[in-house]
Image (cartoon, grey):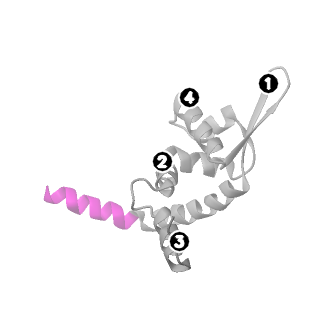
């Protein structure tokens, strides 16, 4: 077994998390974050824990299937915590984890950017469509 220098180990570690490589685990995280329902659900939970139906009302347009899949994926990734409280009926709450809260801050910046630049983007779209 060949030994590696510290520089070689650092170079390998940098390659291990290169989102431009198809096999990189960080690519899956970026794919998750890029999903439109994910950002909407995370922002909905930014105000505090919500029950399933409350999340659904906060994210209009998401089907029950899509909402369930999104919440499960976020829970799996450690961005959302699911708490079941025994009652009749059973109460299930969803809340952001510390990692989820850190991501919501970034999404807020992107949301602000989108709102500030929407007029220019719409104008560019109209200009482009007018050329077609």
The residue under label 3 is 3
The one of 19 and 131 positioned closer to us in this rendering:
19
The image shows residue 19 at horizontal and vertical percentages of 44, 61
Furthest residue toward top: 88
Of pointers 4 and 1, the one earlier in the residue sequence:
4
Of pointers 3 and 2, the one earlier in the residue sequence:
3
> Closer to us: mark 2 or mark 4?
2
The residue under label 1 is 90
Query: In terms of secondary structure, where does tag 1 sit?
Result: loop
- Sort mark 4 into few (<14), some (14-19) or many (20+) by Cα contacts within 10 Å: few
Point out which mark residue 102 bears: none
The residues tagged by marks 1 and 3 sit, at their Cα atoms, a distance apart of 56 Å
- Sort mark 3 into few (<14), some (14-19) or many (20+) by Cα contacts within 10 Å: few
> Closer to us: mark 3 or mark 4?
3
The image shows residue 35 at horizontal and vertical percentages of 48, 47
Q: In which quadrant of the rendered view does residue 69 lie?
A: top right
The image shows residue 89 at horizontal and vertical percentages of 80, 21
The image shows residue 115 at horizontal and vertical percentages of 48, 63
Point out which mark residue 64 bears: 4
Compared with 100, 52 (above or below) is above
Locate residue 106 relative to residue 82 in the image: left or right.
left
Query: In terms of secondary structure, where does tag 4 sit?
Result: helix
Of pointers 1 and 2, the one earlier in the residue sequence:
2
Residue 75 appears in view: yes
Q: Is residue 128 magenta?
A: yes
The residues tagged by marks 3 and 4 sit, at their Cα atoms, a distance apart of 53 Å
Query: In terms of secondary structure, where does tag 3 sit?
Result: loop
Residue 17 appears in view: no
Locate residue 112 relative to residue 21 in the image: left or right.
right
Compared with 109, 65 (above or below) is above
Of pointers 2 and 4, the one earlier in the residue sequence:
2
């Amino acid at each position: 077994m060949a030994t590696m220098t510290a520089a070689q180990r650092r170079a390998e570690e940098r390659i291990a998390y290169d989102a431009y490589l198809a096999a990189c685990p960080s690519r899956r995280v970026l794919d998750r974050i890029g999903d439109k329902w994910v950002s909407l659900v995370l922002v909905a939970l930014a105000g505090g824990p919500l029950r399933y139906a409350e999340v659904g009302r906060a994210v209009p347009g998401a089907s029950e299937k899509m909402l369930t899949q999104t919440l499960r994926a976020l829970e799996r990734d450690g961005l959302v915590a699911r708490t079941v409280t025994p009652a009749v009926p059973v109460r299930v709450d969803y809340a952001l984890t510390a990692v989820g809260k850190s991501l919501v801050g970034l999404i807020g910046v992107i949301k602000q950017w989108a709102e500030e630049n929407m007029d220019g983007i719409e104008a560019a779209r109209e200009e482009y469509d007018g050329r077609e």
